[in-house]
Image (cartoon, coloured by chain):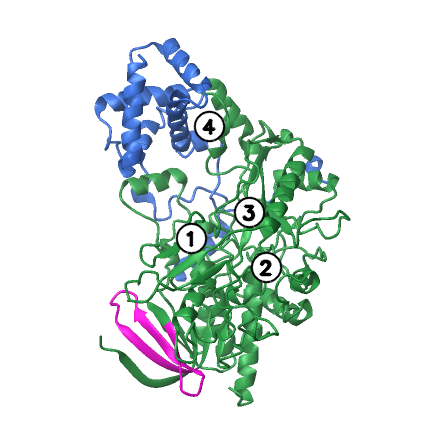
Amino acid sequence: MQASATLAVAASTLPAQDHSQHGLTQIETAAPKKARFFNKQEMALLEQLVEQIIPRSDTPGAADAKVHYFVDLQAHTNKKLGSQLRKDLAWVRKQGFAKGDAAKQVELLTAWSKQKGTSSFGVFQRLKDLTIDGYYGSREGLAQELGWNANTFLREFKGCTHPEHGV
Amino acid sequence: MYVQNAPEVHDVIVIGSGAAGGMAAWNLTRQGVNVTLLDAGTRFRREEFWTHVKPWQWRERVERGMAPPQIRLDTNEQPYSWKDPNYFELIRVWGRGGKTNIWGRVALRYSDLDFEGPARDGWEIPWPIRYKDIAPYYDKVEQEIGVCGGDDDQDSLPGSRFHLPPAAPRCGERLLQAAAKRQGISIVNQRRAVVTKPHNGHNPCHYCGACGRGCDVSAFFNSTDYLLDPAEKTGKLKIIDNAVVARILLGENGLASGVQYFDRYTKQERVIRGKRIVLGASCVDSTRILLNSKSAQYPTGIGNSSGVIGSYLCEQVRFHMYGFVPELLGTKTLNDDGIGGEHIYMPRFNHRDGKKRDYLRGYGSQFWGIGAQPGAAYAKQLDGFGLDFKKAVKRRYPALVALHPYGETLPRKENRITVEGTPLDKYGVPTMRIEYNIGDNEKKMIAEMYDMAEGVLRAAKAEILPFQRGWLDNFGSAIHEHGTCRMGEDRRRSALNGFNQMHDVKNLFVVDGSAFTTASEKNPTLTILALAWRSTDYLAEEMRKGNL
């Protein structure tokens, strides 16, 4: 209760700010990433795939956000998903994705993405869904790309300030 | 096994520490009554909540093997079964405050449209109370705990002059409000048990939007900080931790005489004696306890001469529909957290628009998921990949709007909880089986709910995310279980009277959602609080008169 009271006092005197300094400093900096499920070759392929799905632009891409490590962790914690993804990656490799240049990679992904209802589309959608979860939950994807700046302390919530949005 | 039987006979035993049990303990102790409360867990430490952990920090923590505090009960610890294929998602919290630690905070008053529903249409038994009986208690509950909202009164959703200031609507919410108005549907300020300004010593909300992880400053109603801590200050409340109640015992005089429980971790069996018992362990767990409390006099469970206990389980049907409003496409991302969840509510309107329906009762709508969210799951439903895809996701991000309608499910005998022939739990007590389904009435209502949601989004000129008409959230996922120990005038068709007192066993009161005669389309917690207050006022008065 005392800790709560202290926080509440702080809330009314501080402007909106990142709250991460409160007790989270120890884990604020990301640890160096280590693959837990996939081997080196699989990780390299995964990195190419996630980066093609969400590439770097004027903001970071999925590889910058280490989304391949996010996918690796999902595979590590869900072995059924892991073995499916391992199969998916082997299939992707067989299609000549890893060796292809960027244009070839885009061509392959474009083809798979259009074959709805097929297993190729299934592989594409599985990788895409994981890339979306990984990227848009990362600092790079959520804060830098989408501009999310929430889960903070505000003294006041103003809501909509646009008269034209109203009734 | 050695059973420790304490000789003490407690004045009142309260089972459960959530909205129902917390209110019972608070209201009795402040009137000078000694209460012993059995809680199936211990206090949750709000200093440990992950309230202010950003999504990427959360990920880092999990990678390091950390986990947020376990608030929800792990089903493996207390299993239950369901009748395939109808999975029933049962969400329970064992520990101080129960589900009020993480509840949705929506605090709607029932109206006479709800209380008079069954009397009007003849489906199942009527409520024994009306709005006038409970209105003073809604007033008192709102003044005590703090509920923000509007005084915009409707026949289906009473307002209140005791509401705290409402949370300001977000852009997307105002656009939907305007679109619904063009459809002839009114959307009002949401009522939520969130303290939008300092109230009764409780900290105001700081708009971090992470209420579902537990509030680190206790700015929304939870039974621990708002009821049990003040109750303990009276010196009249004793709480026994980790007490998993198995049965209520029947004395030779036909009254409840005590409670059998097991220590959650040592599994040691204990019995305590009491003169009066108030059961508020949540609808399903209270029902499990009642059904397991068999005796020669009540072979199907204590107080079940009517045979209704366990039956008439009713919840709500709900789904989500998402879209993107054109005015907000490509605009600057705002901090849309607010008080968490939606700031607006669509009260039931199907009784007054003049159109004829071929179903009974009604629905309302919530709107959670409007504006900038901590993720972009909608992107999975957008086609393509690459730079154009990335742009499409970003452009839509500030423009997300959502409808989340809730419809009433009728009480039916065959929707039931039983404890027969199911496996035993780790204490050797039978576990629950839940049989649940919806019928034609709900299906017809759901069809209209889909039309309504789509109509509002179309009126807003929104791009609607693909949806599958008729798709529903899991049964049980509203976490609004009701009806399995219902109140009514007719003791042959109900278990409790209008004061939540058992018809059969006069010193046993059941004050949680199980007491509801119908489910309504509304969130029940405010009504549980009001009924528990009213019921324990009655109990205290009966004690003063020497009747109990």
Give the blue chain's letter: A
Q: Amino acid at mark 1?
A: Lys
Q: Position of residue B532 (x, y in %)?
A: 54, 71
Foreground of the two, B501 or B182: B501
Residue B518 sits above or below residue B262 on the image: above
Give yes or no for contact between labels 4 and 1 (Cβ–Cβ under 8 Å).
no
Q: Position of residue A110 (x, y in %)?
A: 43, 15
Q: Tell me how far mark 3 sits from mark 4, CA to CA.
A: 33 Å
SS at circle 1? loop
Same chain for labels 3 and 4? Say yes or no: no
Chain for numbered disc 2: B
Tell me the mark number nearer the camera, choosing from 4 and 1.
1
Residue B394 sits above or below residue B259 on the image: above
Chain for numbered disc 3: B
SS at circle 3? strand
Question: How many residues crowd mark 4 within 10 Å: few (<14), some (14–19), many (20+)?
Answer: many
Residue at the disc numbered 2:
B147
Residue at the disc numbered 1:
B83
Residue B443 sits above or below residue B234 on the image: above
Residue at the disc numbered 3:
B318
Residue B262 is labelled as: none
| The colour assigned to chain B within the rendered structure | green
Residue in the image at 44% along x and 18% along y: A115
Q: Amino acid at mark 3?
A: Arg
The answer to whether residue B125 is magenta is no
Q: Tell me how far mark 1 sits from mark 3, CA to CA.
A: 20 Å
Same chain for labels 2 and 3? Say yes or no: yes
Q: Residue furthest bottom?
A: B546
Residue at the disc numbered 4:
A145
Q: Position of residue B540 (x, y in %)?
A: 53, 82
Question: In the picture, which quadrant includes the N terminus of chain B?
Answer: bottom left
In terms of sequence position, does the residue under pointer 2 or pointer 1 come before the other?
A: 1
